[in-house]
Image: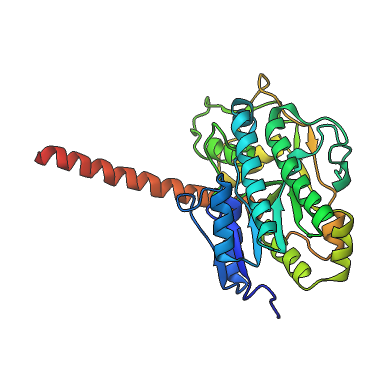
Amino acid sequence: MFNPLRNKKIFIAGHRGMVGSAIVKYFKNQGVKKLILVSRKKLDLLSQDKVYKFIKNKKPDVIINCAGKVGGILANSKYPVEFLNINILIQLNLINAAYQNKIHNFINLGSSCIYPKKAKQPIKEDYLLSSSLEKTNEAYALAKIIGLKACEYYNKQYGTSYLTLMPCNLYGPNDNFNLKNSHFVPALIKKITNSSSGKKSKIEIWGTGNAKREVMYVDDLASAIFFILKKKILKNKKFLKIIKKNPVINLGSGKDFSIKQFAKMICRLSEKKDNLYYNKKYPDGTMRKILDNKTIRSLGWEPKISLEQGLFKTIEWYKEKSLCRSEFLKILAFFQCTVYYVA
């Protein structure tokens, strides 16, 4: 099958994160040969000058922005300044550099959490900014909205065709499992997988467990981005008509489940007892958040990985990573003791 991306130079900003690493893997599997990847140490995305010079030097055909500061309710509430500043700077630096260097294909990633708190369900693309945001992640939402609007304004003023994709909650390998700043799926996986098997031990879950969330395995997002870029580069008439009207496209699984349902499924897949305790002192956040995916479905894309498959893959990845870390610490402790004894 003809692959218009095969010989395109594609810069993936944030390639070591969960989303970026999934895109790298998927694009390589599809035969894309010219991926441009650079570490944070070698390119500071917070520096406008450095980003401009990098883009000018590399001259990519496509830029996909997966970089940014993300986290759950606790992290968003504790560090709003960082969530606001870091995400605004990264997005605007990349968008401005893309325009200044005449890069025609720019993919920006938004998030379903930037839609209004009380948006009608399922959430359509044009519901953005129709009412107030969820307070627990307001700083992040405002920052991502600025990136989205920057793409829209460049399209309107300069005739570009930059896109913002709005995925639902994502999960998968390379996710952040730090309980202080992770999203709910990796937090549940870590708490449940690491829980004691004792009858009296309880697994604490924040909130009532009644809030519902739509999630998607990260490999499905990678496939959607590949699909959309192919449509854009081949100048598919139906696709171009859609993005001219609204350069924002929702991407989701089309199904939502309560936090309780997620927790119970993870218990079953982890072979752990369902000793769940819901701490109602913590907020639920938005009670329901499911996207209207009619736009992307009308173009012929749909996710392929079921919730059970995705959760199982993620749990197995986490277990393997935890085991490797445990073995490494044992070896390190052994050598430290040996050195001490010899000394």
Left or right: residue 287 versus residue 45 is right
User: Where is residue 213 drawn, in percent x and y?
Assistant: 74, 40
Name the residue located 44 percent from the left edge and 45 percent from the top edge.
322
Q: Residue at x 62, y 76 (%)?
A: 7
Point out the residue furthest to the left here. Answer: 343
Residue 294 seen anywhere in this rendered image of the structure: yes
In depth, the one of 73 and 76 nearer the eye is 76
Q: Is residue 314 visible?
A: no
Above or below 2: residue 129: above
Nearer to the camera, 310 or 71? 71
The residue sitting at the top extreme is 281
Q: Quadrant of the N terminus?
A: bottom right
Toward the viewer: 134 or 170?
A: 134
Q: Residue furthest bottom?
A: 1
Residue 251 image position (x, y, % from top left) = 77, 53
Q: Residue at x 50, y 57 (%)?
A: 38
Residue 292 in percent (x, y) is at 85, 49
Please tell me in which quadrant of the rendered image residue 87 appears.
Answer: top right
Coloring applied to the structure: rainbow
Residue at image coords 61%, 66%: 60
Where does residue 152 sit, x and y in percent of width and height?
Answer: 80, 50
Image-based side of 272 in relation to 259, left or right: left
Q: Is 30 located above or below residue 109 in the figure?
A: below
Q: How many marks?
A: 0
Vertical order, 209 against 144 (above or below): above
Q: Is residue 117 left or right of residue 24?
A: right
Q: Quadrant of the C terminus?
A: top left
